[in-house]
Image: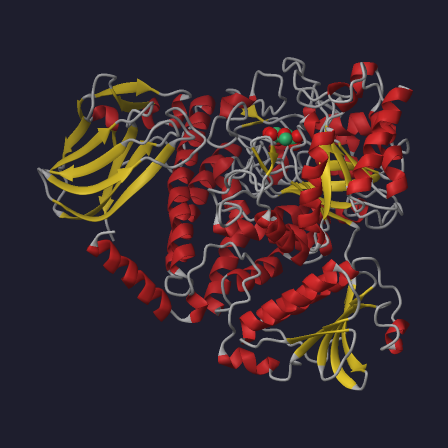
Amino acid sequence: MSVYQKLVTLGVLLLSMALPCHLRAETGYDAWLRYSVLTDSERVKYGSLPASVVVFGESTVLHAAQQEMVRGVQGMLGRILRVGKDQVEEKAIVLGTLDGLRSVAPWLQGREGLHADGFWLTTGKIQGFDCVIITALKDRGVLYGMFAFLSKMARNESVAALNEVQQPYAPIRWVDQWDNLDGRIERGYAGPSIFFDNGNVRGDLTRARDYARLLASIGINGCTINNVNADPRVLEDSFLPELTRVADAFRLWGVQLAISVNLSSPKAVGGLDTFDPLDPRVEQWWRKRVDVLYREIPDFAGFVIKADSEGQAGPSTYNRTAADAANVIARALKPHGGIVFYRAFVYNHHLDWREPKNDRAKAAYDFFHPLDGKFEDNVIIQIKHGPIDFQVREPASPLFGGLRSTNQAIELQVTQEYMGQQRHLCFLAPMWKEVLDFDLHVGGGQTPVKDLVAGKVFHRPTGGFVGVVNVGMDANWLGHPLAMANLYAFGRLAWNPNLSASTLADEWTRLSFSSDPIVVKTIGAMQVASWHVYESYTGPLGAGTLTDILGSHYGPDVDSSERNGWGQWHRGDHEGIGMDRTVSTGTGYSGEYTAAVATLYESIATTPDELLLFFHHVPYTHVLHSGKTVIQHIYDSHYQGAEQAQHYVHQWESLKGRIDDERYAAVLARLEYQAGHAIVWRDAICTWFRRMSGIADAEKRVGNYPDRTEAESMQLEGYVPLDVMPPENASGGKAVECSPEAHRCVASLRFAAPAGWYELDVQYFDQNNGESTFRLLVGEQVIDEWVADDHLPAVKVGGDSSTRHRTKKLALRPGDRVRIEGTPDGREHAAFDYIEIRPAN
Ligand code: GCW
C-alpha cells in the first residue's frame, strides 16, 4: 500500500468514526432489521422496558427469538438484556407459547381464537412481576410476535400497555427462488445463488440462514429454493444430505424448506421407464422418495411443480391430467403433512398467431377450471396474478374465480423480470393491491382475490400467497437498495393484504433508512408513484410490456411480441392496436369472468382506460375516457413518465446527508441510469408508434430533439455508422461503432452556441462482452472519462445496452471542438448513439 493509499484509508476510517451513529456505513445487508440506535428523545419511550428476556420452553425457534430480542434491544437502546429461562425473577419480557406459559400464567389461557402462526402481545403479572408477554399457539408465532415487537420499537411506536392480537390472513406465505444448481438464477438480478454453487449446495450457508431470518421477520413460513424449471437431480439420493443442510439453516427461523421437482423424475433419476402418474410403479416411486425425504427432514414443506409448460415434461405425455399428476405426489406427501403446489402457468408457446381466436390469456382457465374439485386436499394451484405473465398491467386472473373446490395461491413476482430488473425503481405493492382487492363477484357478497386465494370464500383448508423473489449474493440481496421494499411488502401483504401501499412504503422506509420525516416522505412518494411511472414510459393502456420478450425482457422491442407462438400479442398495426378479447368479436377471454366482471370488460365504454388495449383493438384515433386519443395518450404518457424518472434523481439528491453515503451513492447511480434508460424507452416506443400510426405528436416532441447531435452526423475518425435493429432502439435508427481495425476512435463536432455553462449527455452502448473506455474532450482538455463496465443484459448495440453518461457544468464557447473518444474492448466496440448539449441550470 502506498503512503497515499494509507492516508486515504485512514481518512475513510476517521470519517466513518466521526459520522453520527445513524449514518454508519451500510451495505443494505441488514435490510429492515437494522436495529439502528434510536435518538435520545425516541429512547425515552422505552425507559421502563424490562432488563431481562425470559423464554419458557425449549426449541431452536424460541431460542432464536430470545437472541433476536437481545440483539434488537442492544442495537436500538444500547442495553444488553439479561437472558433467563423458565422462571421470572424480575420485570421481564416473556417469550413462550400458551402451553409453555400455562403453569405460570394460567390467566392467559382465556384467549381464544388464536390461529397457528398468529401471536398475542400483552402485559401482565407472571410469578409476581410485571411482564411484557409475547405468546402464541406455536413457537413460530412467538417468533413473529417478537419481530412485530421490535419493529414497533424501530418505528418508535409505543410498546407500553400492549394488548394486540395478530393473525395471518392465510396459512401459505411462501417465497420461491428460481435458483439453478450451477449457481445461476433464472430471472435473478442480484448475483449468483445463495444456495447453490457448481452443482451442489454451498458449503457456507450463512446467507441462507440470514435470508430465513429476514423472511421470518415478515411472516414468511416456506421457501422453495430451486428453479421451477427443475433439475431432476434434486431428488437423487446423493442430494438429500445437501437439502438437509439447507433445512437446518432455515429451521431456527421457522422457515420450512420446499423444492421444485421435475415430473419426469421417476424416469430421469428413478430408473423407471415411465413417469406416467397412473402407473403403480410411479406412484410407489414417489411414495418411497418422499418417505426418505421426511426421514431426514421431518418438517419438509413440500414440492412445487411446473409441468407441460415452456418445455417442461408433464402428464400430457401420457394423456393424463394435471390432477392425475398432482394427486399421485400429493398422496405421497399427505401422511407427512406436505403440500404440492401445481403451477397454473400452463400454456402452448407454439400458438398460431394467425388465428384470431387464439389467446394465451385463456390458457390457465381453460386448463384448470374443468379440473376443479379433482385435486387432493393438499394440492394448491399456484396462479400468477394475471392471465399472461407478470406484465406491467394485467387484469386479475379469472382462474381465481374459477376454482371453488380446489385450493389456490396467488403467485406474485418480487423479482422485477418485466419491471426494469431492479435497475428501474418499481414498487409493486400498488399493483398487487389492485389485484388482491379486485372483486371477481363469484358467489354472493364481496369476493376479492385476497379472500379467494386465502380460501375464505369457499372454505378451503389451505391457500395463500407465493412470491418469486430471487435474492442473490449481492450484499443488498436484490441489487437495487430500494427494491427490497418489494420483498418487505410481499411478506406484509401475505400476512395482511389490507395494509395500504403507502403504509408499507412508510414502514419499510423507517426500518430500512430512518424515521427522519423528510426521508420517510421522499422515499415513500417515490416508491408509491413508481409503478405508474414505469408503466407510463414502457407501455400504457394495458398493451402489455412492449419489451424484448424473445430475449432479455428488459429494453424496448415492440415487434418482438408479434408473429410468434409466445402469445404476448398486442396486434399493433398501421390502423390500431390492442387484443380483442371480447366474447362478441374477439377471443372470448372476457367470458371467463362472471357476468358482472365480464360485462365491465366486454364493452369499450366500461373498460377502464388502463386496460383498454388488453381487451379491445381500437384505432389510434379512438378517444379515451380521459378525452385524449390513444395515440396522443401514448406520446404524452411516455414523455411524462420519462420526465418523472428524471425527477427521481432530484428527489433523491434532496436526501444527501440524511442517509448513509454508501446507500445514497448506490441508489443515486441506479436512478441516474434509470433516468437515461427511461428516455431510451420513451424514444423507442414513441418512434415505433409514430411510424406505425403515421400520426404526429400534437406537442411536436416525437422525432424532434433540439439539443441532440446524432453520432453518425459528427466528424468520424475510426468510427463507422451502424444500422441498429430494431431501428427505434437508436436515435435515427443508427449509431457509430469503432471499425474492426481501429484501436481508438474519435467523433467530433464544432460547438456553435453562445459561450456558457452546459451539461452534456453521451448516449453510449454498454454491453457485457467488453469494457470500452470513453473520454470527452474539449480541444485537447480531457473533461471526463468513464468505462462501459455495467452488467446489463446485452451483448449488442440496442435498447438493452443504451446508457446515458452525463457531464454536468462544463464551460463551452463557440468554435470549441467537442470530441468523444472511444477505446473498444473485447466484443464491445465503444459504440454510441448521440450527444445532447443543453444549458446547465
Ligand atoms: O415469465 C416466464 C419467465 C421464465 C419462467 C416462467 C415461469 C422459470 O420468463 O423464466 O421460468 O415465466 O414462471 O415458469
Q: Which residue sits furthest bottom? A: 128
Q: Is residue 143 left or right of residue 572?
A: right
**Where does ligand 1 appear, by image quarter?**
top right
Q: Is residue 730 left or right of residue 471?
A: left
Q: Is residue 278 visible?
A: no
Q: Is residue 557 left or right of residue 449?
A: left
Decide which of 830, 397 is in the foreground and name it.
830
Place of residue 641 in the rendered image (x, y in percent of width and height, measured from the top left):
46, 43
Indicate whether 85 appears above or below 652.
below
User: Which of the 4 image quadrants contains residue 61?
Assistant: bottom right
| Residue at 29% across, 58% down | 9
Place of residue 658 in the rendered image (x, y in percent of width and height, measured from the top left):
41, 65
| Residue at 80% across, 50% down | 171
Place of residue 500 in the rendered image (x, y in percent of width and height, measured from the top left):
65, 57
Place of residue 640 in the rendered image (x, y in percent of width and height, measured from the top left):
44, 44
| Residue at 70% across, 55% down | 252
Q: Is residue 822 visible?
A: yes
Q: Is residue 792 left or right of residue 276?
A: left
Decide which of 350, 467 is in the foreground and name it.
467
